[in-house]
Amino acid sequence: MTNKSLGQHIKVSDFEKLVHSVLFRNDTSGTSIVNPKSIKIHELAEKSISINMPANSCVSGHNVTLFIFQGLMKEKIKHIPQNGKLKNCFEIVGKVREVTHLEDRNDVNVDIHFSQYDIRGWKKISDQYEKQQEKINQLFLQKSQS
C-alpha cells in the first residue's frame, strides 16, 4: 500500500469557492441590508436558512425577504424596492424564528423559516453546498485511508 500525501489527493477544483451574496429586507420594519458583506450564510435546511448578520436587524416573528445572488455581487444596490423584485436573484419570503446574539461580536445568528419560495430553486442552491461539503469529506476520508 502506497502512502500518499494529502497533496496527492487535492485537485484545483477542490478549492473553488462556493459563494452566494445575500441581501435582506425586513418587511415588518421596512429596513434593509444592502451590503452583502454584512450577511453570511451559516446553515441551510430544507425549508429554512440560518444567517449571521448585524444585530438589531430583526426580531423573532418579523416577516423578511432574502435575495440570494450566485457569486459575488458586481453591482452595488442602494436600496431594495419595497414592492419590487431584484433581477438575477433567488427570492425567499420567510419569518424569523429565532435570533441569537453571537459572543464577542455585534452580530446575530438569525434562523428564518420559509413561507414563499421556489422549492426547485432552493434545492439547486442547497445541492451546491451539499456537493461542496461532500468534496471536503471525501478529501479527508481519502487521507485517513492512506
Image: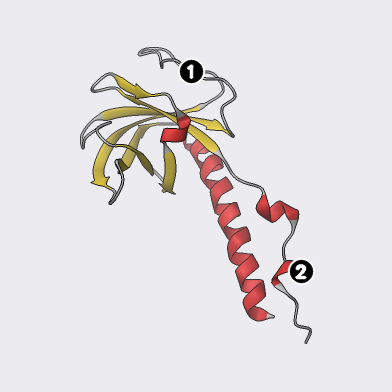
Residue under the point 25% across and 47% down: 100
In the rendered image, residue 112, in percent from the top left (x then y), is placed at: 32, 39
Give the quadrant of residue 106. top left
The residue pinned by badge 1 equals: 77
Q: Horizontal placement of 32 versus 91: left or right?
A: left
Q: Horizontal placement of 9 versus 134: left or right?
A: right
For the residues labelled 1 and 2, the Cα–Cα distance comes to: 43 Å
Q: Horizontal placement of 133 versus 11: left or right?
A: left
Q: Is residue 104 above or below residue 144?
A: above
What's the amino acid at mark 2? Answer: Gln
Q: Nearer the viewer, residue 6 or 63?
A: 6
Considering every residue shown, the one lying at the far front of the view is 104
Is the residue marked by circle 2 packed among few (<14), some (14-19), or many (20+) residues within 10 Å?
A: few
The residue pinned by badge 2 equals: 8
In the picture, the quarter occupied by the N terminus is bottom right
Secondary structure under badge 1?
Answer: loop
Considering every residue shown, the one lying at the far right of the view is 2
Residue under the point 40% across and 13% down: 81
In the picture, the quarter occupied by the C terminus is bottom right
